[in-house]
Amino acid sequence: MIDIDRQNRICALIVGFLRQYFEKEDVASDKIEVWIADWLKKQSSKISQIQLVTHPIKATHPDIKVSESTSLFCPSHTLPDIPLIGSHCLPKDHPLDIV
């Protein structure tokens, strides 16, 4: 189920951030809404590049080309329990990384 209240709070944060950014860039106040809409449209075209991951490849291999590789999504509760500290120690509801 979609949490509309959470979705509205996230949207308000994004719009607030963008307003502050465009004000610092001296964008005329009557143009800010147009700039925000344009920015969102451009960013939405990049949605296919976003990955939900638990193990981002760039963090492990800094020289790797991300566009030519795949990061891993391995929920902690699916990993084997071993006697070392690792991702398997994280709780089921830990925050995920979006890259």
Image (cartoon, helix red, strand yellow):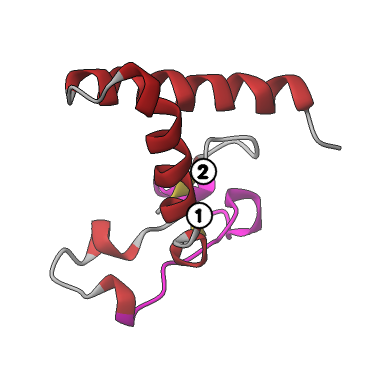
The type of residue carrying mark 1 is Ser
Residue on which disc 2 sits: 96
Residue 23 shows in this picture: yes
In the rendered image, the quadrant that contains the N terminus is: top right
Percent coordinates x, y for residue 71 in the rendering? 41, 67
In the rendered image, the quadrant that contains the C terminus is: bottom left
The type of residue carrying mark 2 is Leu
- Say which of 53 and 92 sits in front: 53
Question: In the rendering, which numbered label is found on residue 80?
Answer: none
Residue on which disc 1 sits: 44
Percent coordinates x, y for residue 98 in the rendering? 46, 49
Q: Is residue 89 left or right of residue 25?
A: right
The local crowd at label 2, few if under 14, some if 14 to 19, many if 20 or more residues have their Cα within 10 Å, is: few
Percent coordinates x, y for residue 50 in the rendering? 47, 59
Q: Does the residue at mark 2 contact the one at mark 1 (Cβ under 8 Å)?
A: no
- The span picked out in magenta is 68-88
- Say which of 86 and 51 sits in front: 51
Q: Is residue 69 magenta?
A: yes
